[in-house]
Amino acid sequence: MTSKTQIESLQRAVPVSRRGFIGGLSVGILGAAAAEAAGTESLGDVPDRGPGADLGAHSERSRFVKLDRIPEATPGKRNVEPSDAINSKTPHQKLVGNITPTDLHYERSHSGVPDIDPAQHRLLIHGLVEKPLVFSVEDLKRMPSVTRVVFIECTGNGWENWKKADPDLTVQNTHGLVSTNEWTGVPLRFLIDLVAKDKGSNWMLAEGGDGAGVDRSIPLTEEIVNEAFVAYGQNGEPLRPAHGFPMRLVMPGFEGNLNIKWLRRLKFGTAPWMTRWETARYTQLLANGKARQFQLRMETNSVITQPSGMMQIQPGYNRISGLAWSGHGKIAKVEISTDGARTWKQAQLSLPVLSKAQVRFQMDWVWDGKPTRIVSRSTDEQGNVQPDRQSFIAAMGTNALFHYNAQQTWSIDEAGRVRNVLA
Amino acid sequence: MSSRNKLFLAGILTAGMLSAPALAFDFGRPATPDEIKLWDIDVSPDGKGLPDGSGTAAQGKQIFADNCAVCHGDNGQGGIKDRLAGGQGTLASNMPVKTVGSFWPYATTLYDYIHRAMPYPTPGSLSAGETYAVTAYILSLNGIVPADGKVDKASLPKIRMPNRDGFIPEPEFDPAKLFRKK
């Protein structure tokens, strides 16, 4: 049995005997499911116990579980050869909880994944500083550290749906460019103090050690100086090469592209450098032909992951679940509509809700078997509400390509088929 | 940021202040001016960071054919990767074509990007003169410098790109206002 069918088994029709069991009466669903299955199977069919495989140096996934990212190119260019891919997307439709497994964290790389020997890697910090310094990975590991769970999101997340909604997309296609991991590293403020940054410097250039030398100008606001850090740890181990080994910048709540991977240089100055990525690339073209620049913060967002695109549900009980996140701080609430955004009910959040991290939401739903549309909308602690698609497009046009955070609607037809649609 | 994080950072700062001289020695080593020069490749819109040397569009045409056309197409169009020329007047249409000529606000960024990231298989392999030449050639394809034009560190920052005023800074991070409120 694959994990997909396991998840689908959770969505099978189960008569709901009482409302609100997600709040604690989980025995309700188990009992109901067992009653339904009783006629078709017996405990005698379950294979006998016995000694298992040898213990190993690593624990691999079960052979019954298949979880993969999918490498993709620009909108509409899916199922490409890995050599043509520019990103690789997280399979949210198959995941549970808040944390993305390390090997399934989405990836956007601009010149492949460099193979860096940490012993030979150096971080240069210079520019408007009193003491330009060079650090090794070991230097960083000796410093005071912070550990924090945050989402990182490519600004291209959601870009499949700007102009149209291909009906056969999964949530991995539409929203696979955001993930949440625990990162460990050295506070930017600590490094700033070590090099004795000039007080007149308010902008920092961060540059990667990849072939493209990806670089971005970062405004040194109080929030950023307080929260940014140079990470060497990811979910308790050294960074994976795809995510910046041996060190990367982590910028909680900000554009994925600012979280410079394979970090090798920080330079302090007084104005943005106007790099290719902050002018020609990650700017948002509006309907009037002007482009929005320095839209650095990731917006309030959410998406229903179960049930989602290309799944099929049965009438009766269905649990709706998904993920919500905001670059502004904590998610305050998530509402779900099961009637095409006419009425809304508040979903339950999986505690604790962390600032600038994805949070799982869920809600009971009994589907009456009639075609409908399901959609989620999140609100963060600053009061920002995820926009409906119509008002979002009215403000941004359809050419922006990046920073798409409109509500995601899934249609469900009379056969229970879930499909990607525009609201 | 949580108050716990604030307290933690405050703790680091206090420790830093108490033992600041020791910390500078304890972590990292001083960077020498010579080695900084090796890595200090960024170019600003005011031309800061541009090296000596120069190149012409005519020289750039051959260098482009040898190093760039395989991905970007002859004349910067029709290749498998980003289109570099044309597209002016399309930005407000339903099919905007973003190229160096139609979209890029600064010519200095073109030099910086070619030097740091191109050619894709061997970034940084072009000399300063070759990089100027390819820059001039791509600008000439867009009618921004003449076909016999030349660029160097004095002329490049003075080029006014067609879409120079095509960007609206997000108010929260507008460089013109961001650090002036305080």
Image: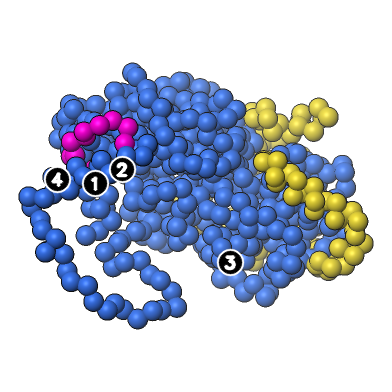
Decide if residue B119 is in sight here. no
Give me the C-alpha separation between circle 4 and circle 3: 47 Å
Q: CA distance from mark 1 to mark 2?
A: 7 Å
Kindly check if marks 1 and 2 are in contact, taking CB atoms under 8 A apart as contact.
yes
Under mark 3, the amino acid is Pro
Identify the residue under disc 1. Answer: A30
Q: Which residue is mark 4?
A: A35
Residue contact at pointers 2 and 4, CB within 8 angstroms: no
Given the image, on which type of amino acid does mark 4 rest? Ala
Image position, residue B134 (x, y; %): 63, 54
Chain under label 2? Answer: A
Q: Which chain is yellow?
A: B
Dots 2 and 3: beta carbons under 8 Å? no
Reply yes or no: does residue A20 show up in magenta: yes
Please give left or right for residue B93 compared with residue B2 in the image.
Answer: left
- Per the rendering, the colour in which chain A appears is blue
Q: SS of the residue at dot 3?
A: strand
Give the number of marks: 4
Q: Which residue is mark 3?
A: A238
**Residue at the spot of label 2:** A26
Which chain is home to disc 4?
A: A
- The residue under the point 61% across, 51% down is A148
Furthest toward the bottom, the residue is: A54
Front of the two marks 1 and 3: 1
Disc 2 to disc 3, how far (Cα)? 38 Å
Q: Do the CB atoms of the residues marked 4 and 3 lie less than 8 Å apart?
A: no
